[in-house]
Image (tube, rainbow, N blue to C red):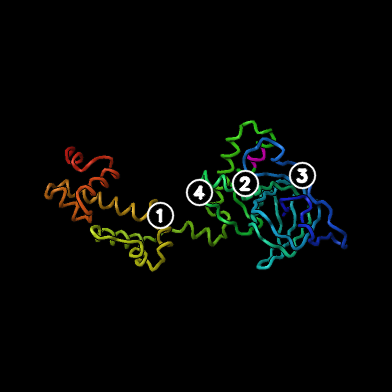
Amino acid sequence: MAGQNSDRWVKPGARSSMPGGTPCPASAERIVDSKQSTWSGLRLQAKQLSDTGQFRDYVWPDSMVALVNHGQAKLQIEADASRFSGVLYPGSLVTIPAGFTVKSLSWTGSHEQTIVVFSPDKLKGFNLQMGGTPVVRPAARFGFSDLELEGILRTMRLEIEAGCPSGPLFGESMSLALLARLASGVWKSPREAANLRATLSTSQQQRVRDFIAANLSSDVGLPDLARLIDASPGHFARLFRNTFGKPPYRYIIEQRIGEAKRMMATGRRSILEIALLLGFSSQSHFTVTFRKVTGTTPKQFLGKL
């Protein structure tokens, strides 16, 4: 893959050669560069790569994602912890993390790439717009497919090639969409991404529901719930949110309020009794929570029965 900070492809002082031991020339013709436009998003470049190329001992300074647009190439990579050998076709994607080091990288086959670089200064601004959540550091992946990610990259390039007619907001929005897609797990290994999407099994869901229903008046904590399925609190919280669409605390509060509404409907107990039975510290605490969940107070709820 192309080094993103220059067309030389190798850091100063690094050894790089073509077959036969000749020095490696500039092997990528730059076709598009967002720096030469009014584009306000993450930096994007399109490059046409020569038929063959090789470089060694290279460290990527910034994370990047690349899409093969045209042509195909056989790629061979040797890194400290991994090796890759395969063919990149149009639509193939590559992600590389900042600091990734290759001992040797070579390709055969002329092809064109669209490359987006995630420099720290740009990421800092976009992370603030994403609520301060940092972008997940990518895994080094070569030759995978993701139609949504491919579509975003193609749209970004078309906008830049057209002269950015949609304005700065479009560039920022597309960059945020790209970061959100990557943060959803695309940059992680397949195993890590599967863990992000994992949910509680049917039997585990029932076990958790039954435990919460039996302990609505107790101060149930995340470790208590995690022990039900022999998981760490962090892993359980992720499984729970993936399953129910909300964190455990919110679910428990909603279950308490639901039970409170059923008890009030019977007319057998006062609001204070119900509040204390369900683990609220006082009637006022119960009233505030009830209103947050239902949009009305307990007395207003009773008045509508």
Q: How many other residues sit within 10 Å of disc 3, few (<14), some (14-19) or many (≥20)?
A: some
Could you give the CA–CA distance between mark 1 and mark 3, rounded to whole angstroms? 45 Å
Badge 4 vs badge 2, beta-carbon distance below 8 Å: no
Give the number of the mark in front: 2 or 1.
Answer: 1
Could you give the CA–CA distance between mark 4 and mark 3, rounded to whole angstroms? 33 Å
Q: Is 65 one of the magenta-colored residues? A: no
First of labels 4, 3 by sequence position: 3
Could you give the CA–CA distance between mark 2 and mark 1, rounded to whole angstroms? 28 Å
The residue to which callout 1 is attached is: 241
The residue to which callout 2 is attached is: 150
First of labels 3, 2 by sequence position: 3
What's the residue at 66%, 60% (across, down)? 100
Check disc 1 and give the amino acid type.
Arg
The residue to which callout 4 is attached is: 132
The residue to which callout 3 is attached is: 30
Check disc 3 and give the amino acid type.
Arg
Q: SS at mark 2?
A: helix
Check disc 4 and give the amino acid type.
Gly
Give the number of the mark in front: 3 or 2.
Answer: 3
In terms of secondary structure, what is the magenta stretch mainly? Answer: helix
Q: SS at mark 1?
A: helix
What's the residue at 74%, 58% (across, down)? 74
Q: Nearer the viewer, residue 4 or 194?
A: 4
Q: Which residues are magenta?
A: 154-158
